[in-house]
């Protein structure tokens, strides 16, 4: 008798106390108030996404996340710098800022048009999460007829690394303050990591 696995989905949760969340929050909110959105269209799904600078602290965060994934799964990953149009740091890292009453719809980070070169591992790092400001929820199929949900409570300094194909959403921010998260996309490492000139 033998048990075999057809598919499984794992995710990694931990804390990174060595990351300076105050520095990150200040930089992100400065960009947010300056209107550095991924898409200026008020109706765009990316309106909540804020461009961020590739500061030494953001670089440190990316390195630490790669190290944690390697420790857990013995796989080397790197930031997804490249898309079909060339090198774009905004496919690799950005921030999500939610004000009161805001949330994120169900989505994933995989690309059907560019799956081979696109994101394989995605990350959320919680920079500032006031009480009741929204949690991450994974959505997955228990079978063809039932959908399951797994809630990951948000806490400052916490990270979540997960398969980029995994659908997820964020519950509503019920607080009066901003919920600030950094998102990153990684792929399995096949060569030297590219350097970004983003500042």
Image (tube, rainbow, N blue to C red):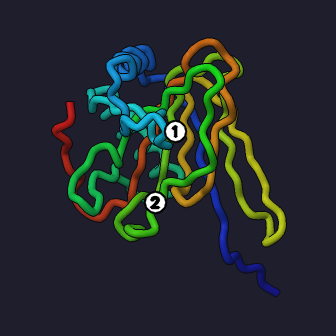
Badge 2 is on which residue? 120
Q: Image quadrant for the C terminus? A: top left
Q: Quadrant of residue 169?
A: top right
Q: Residue at x 65, y 24 (%)?
A: 101
Q: Residues within 10 Å of mark 1 (few under 14, many from 20)?
A: many
| 69 versus 47 height, above or below | below
- Which disc is residue 59 wearing? none
| 130 versus 4 height, above or below | above
Q: Residue furthest left?
A: 197
Q: Nearer the viewer, residue 157 or 80?
A: 80
Camera sees residue 20? no
Q: Residue at x 55, y 57 (%)?
A: 163
Residue 137 placed where, x, y %? 69, 43
- Which disc is residue 124 wearing? 1
Q: Residues within 10 Å of mark 2 (few under 14, many from 20)?
A: many
Residue 37 placed where, x, y %? 37, 32
Q: Is residue 195 left or right of residue 6?
A: left
Camera sees residue 90? yes
Query: Real-space Cα distance between discs 2 and 1?
Result: 14 Å
Number of marks present in the image shown: 2
Q: Is residue 52 left or right of residue 148?
A: left
Residue 8 placed where, x, y %? 66, 66
Q: Residue at x 68, y 77 (%)?
A: 6
Element assignment for label 2: loop
Q: Residue at x 53, y 51 (%)?
A: 72
Q: Nearer the viewer, residue 185 or 5?
A: 185
Element assignment for label 1: strand
Residue 96 placed where, x, y %? 48, 32
Q: Nearer the viewer, residue 160 or 30?
A: 30
């Amino acid at each position: 008798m033998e048990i075999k696995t057809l598919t499984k989905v794992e995710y990694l949760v931990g804390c990174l106390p060595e990351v300076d969340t105050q520095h990150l929050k200040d930089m992100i909110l400065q960009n947010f108030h300056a209107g550095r959105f991924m898409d200026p269209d008020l109706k765009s799904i990316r309106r909540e996404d804020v461009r961020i600078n590739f500061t030494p602290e953001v670089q440190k965060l990316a390195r630490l996340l790669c190290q944690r994934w390697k420790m857990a799964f013995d796989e080397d990953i790197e930031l997804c710098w490249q898309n079909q149009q060339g090198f774009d740091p905004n496919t690799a890292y950005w921030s999500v800022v939610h004000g009161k009453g805001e949330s994120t719809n169900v989505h994933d980070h995989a690309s059907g048009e560019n799956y081979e070169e696109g994101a394989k591992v995605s990350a959320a790092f919680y920079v500032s999460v006031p009480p009741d400001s929204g949690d991450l929820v994974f959505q997955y199929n228990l079978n063809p007829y039932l959908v399951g949900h797994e809630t990951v409570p948000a806490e400052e300094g916490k990270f979540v690394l997960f398969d980029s194909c995994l659908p997820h959403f964020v519950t509503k921010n019920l607080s009066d303050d901003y919920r600030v998260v950094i998102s990153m996309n990684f792929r399995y490492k096949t060569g030297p990591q590219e350097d970004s000139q983003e500042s």
